Amino acid sequence: MVIALVIIATWLTSLILLLSVDISHFNILTLSLAVLWQAFLYTGLFITTHDAMHGVVFPRNNKINHFIGSLCLTLYGFLPYEKLLKKHWMHHHNPASEKDPDFHDGEHKNFFAWYFYFMKNYSSWGQMLIITIIYNFAYFIVHIPRTNLTFFWAIPALISSIQLFYFGTFLPHREPKDGYSEPHRAQTISYPVWWSFLTCYHFGYHEEHHESPHVPWWQLPDVHMLKRSKISQN
């Protein structure tokens, strides 16, 4: 719960500060780092939602747990929590199969085709309308500069969606040359712990996640290391 609240507070504080700065003072490096930083925090919001779907943000109270998950998903992109909760458990029960809502349809297997197919399944016109209304309200009524809204609100969310798809769906669930390993049909992207954190909050330790779905994201490195040590001993 503390980690979830820190991520939410850091994202909100960073967004408010970045929306209020004079972007003309930024060089290309500073601007790029600011965009990537905000995208990283967006990813943290979604990973928190993901943990809430597994009941580990606040296990002692299910209502609070799911409220935090729903709040993070709203801040992330005004997505419906109950709908994603149902689809996510369909994914866990039927990974990398025709019943998996995150999986490609047998035709859209390459990264770009699969990504757009994936996003089509989760986006809606209602979501796009809400985002458009808020964007224009912030620009015309609150007078937040359009460049700030674009670089620090819109673009980071898009980058985050690509980041989450690439490290959390495409790499772990694309079919290996030797075929899938049952029953989870997921593979781990074995990066060093620091790089695993920066890329996607350890979401790359995906086989471990499917094997232990109630382990929070920040404990996945321990599960990964324990599994590797057992393999090396055998």
Image (cartoon, helix red, strand yellow):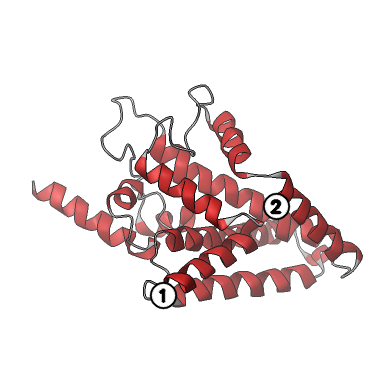
**Horizontal side, residue 33 vs residue 64: left or right:** right
Mark 1 and mark 2 in contact? Answer it, CB < 8 Å.
no
Q: Element type at marker 2?
A: helix
**Measured from the top left, where is residue 86 in percent x and y?**
47, 49
Outermost residue, top side: 107
Identify the mark at residue 228; answer none if there is no mark: none
Task: Tell me if mark 2 has few (under 14), some (14-19) or many (20+) residues whose alpha carbon lies within 10 angstroms of its own.
Answer: some
- Disc 1 on helix, strand or loop? loop
Residue 25: x, y in percent?
80, 66
Where residue 181 appears, as percent x and y from the top left, is: 26, 34
- Please state which amino acid type lies under the numbered disc 1: Asn
Direction bottom: furthest residue: 2
The residue at 55%/51% (across/down) is 83
Q: Quadrant of the N terminus?
A: bottom left
Which mark's residue is nearer the viewer, 1 or 2? 1
Figure check: 66 above or below 161: below
Mark 1 neighbour class, 10 Å CA radius: few under 14, some 14 to 19, many 20 or more: few
Q: Quadrant of residue 59?
A: bottom left
Q: Which label belongs to residue 61?
A: 1
Q: In screen coordinates, is 51 left or right of 125?
A: left
Up-down: is 196 above or below 4? Answer: above
Identify the mark nearer the N-term, 1 or 2. Answer: 1
What's the residue at 83%, 65% (across, down)?
138
Residue 154 placement: quadrant: bottom right
Image location (x, y in percent) of residue 159? 62, 49
Residue at position x 39%, y 40% from top? 172
Q: Nearer the viewer, residue 69 or 232?
A: 69
Q: Residue furthest right?
A: 140
The foreground one among 161 and 63 is 63
Looking at the image, residue 214 sits to the left or right of residue 26; the answer is left
Q: Mark 2: which amino acid?
A: Ile
Mark sitting on residue 155: 2
